[in-house]
Image: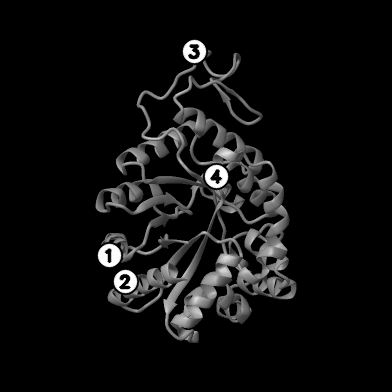
Amino acid sequence: MRLGIQLGYSGDGFAHAVEELVEYEAAGAELVVVPEAYSFDAVSQLGYIAARTDRLRIASGVMQLYTRTPTLTAMTAAGLDYVSGGRFSLGLGASGPQVIEGFHGVAYDAPLARTREVVEICRRVWRRETLEFEGEHYRIPLPAGRGTGLGKPLKIINRPVRTRIPILIAAMGPRNVALAAEIAEGWQALFLDPGAAARVWAEPLAEGLSRRKPELGPLDVMVPVPFAIAAPTPALLDRHRAQLALYLGGMGARGRNFSNDLLRRYGYRRQAELIQELYLSGRRAEAAAAVPDDLVRATSLVGRPDEVRRRLAEFAAAGVTTLLVSPLAATRAGRVEDVGRLRELIDGS
């Protein structure tokens, strides 16, 4: 199992976070994932991290496919792969209509079809093909009657470090997960409960894997988890509980909240309705209190060494191949020490 670090997207301490990343790298972390949401862009931060680290692999988590043209996404990925010496993976996701339409002013339509087309265009660019693409949503070059009519097929000027940059698709819905299993090197999951994974994800994963091309290799299943080697006290888990409430209650509208839909598929239908109602009415503390304790514990990795070792086995049995931890210890030294101890636990399992 790979050990990665999941950066946050809020706060002003990025420079300090990168200094800490250097120490995580020395402690055995193999990967860092940088989110974007509607915060600072991921690309500039990834470039800075690439310059400050030596072996740490870097990934976006995620670049929103609506906010860049497919070709710019491919160019950016190739550029990050170049400056990192072949250490970059392209995390892609559709985000949601509140962010895409509300912050970017772009229509949120056909996320699955657009994802498939963007992935195909990226791979053609990295292979340095002269780009001609006629999809349902993207036409390159623009056809006659659109634009000036002066567009001509081109290929990227530079030679990418790799002609196959790994693509990691963020997905929560069954059809999105099936698509990730079919066409991507990795699946970025969110709030994965190992105990419910087989019941909720086995069918869409099997569907996607049945169409997967052998050259893609095994699917990398990546799961972010809050993490500490310590007794799972309420105070230690409160931050995760609040984040769950935010996503389950506030990241989306009634009837269009992907995290809330996932909670319902886990079997918490009544709690899903309550959390959303409380959060959207401004009662955020009550929404957090309504998050099921079982879900808080299942979607985090907090405990004494023996408990962490047991949970690692549960994640592995659920098919997880990369853990993206967000260390929770109060001090930087404590967080780095925990990452090193987790590295030892993973290696010894």
- What's the CA distance linking mark 3 and mark 2? 55 Å
Disc 1 to disc 4, C-alpha distance:
31 Å
Residue visible at 47% across and 28% down?
125
Q: Say which residue label 3 marks.
A: 150
The mark nearer the N terminus, 4 or 3, is 3
- Check if mark 2's residue and mark 1's residue have beta carbons within 8 Å: yes
Q: Of label 1 and label 4, which has the lower sequence position?
A: 1
Measuring 67% from the left and 72% from the top, which residue is drawn there? 277
- What amino acid type is highlighted by mark number 4? Gly
- In the picture of the structure, the residue carrying the numbered disc 2 is 336
Q: Residues within 10 Å of mark 3 (few under 14, many from 20)?
A: few
Label 1 vs label 4, nearer the camera? 4
**In this rendering, does residue 24 appear at all?**
yes
Nearer to us of marks 4 and 3 is 4
Q: Which residue is mark 4?
A: 217
Is residue 339 shown left or right of residue 288? Answer: left
What secondary structure is found at the residue carrying circle 4? Answer: loop
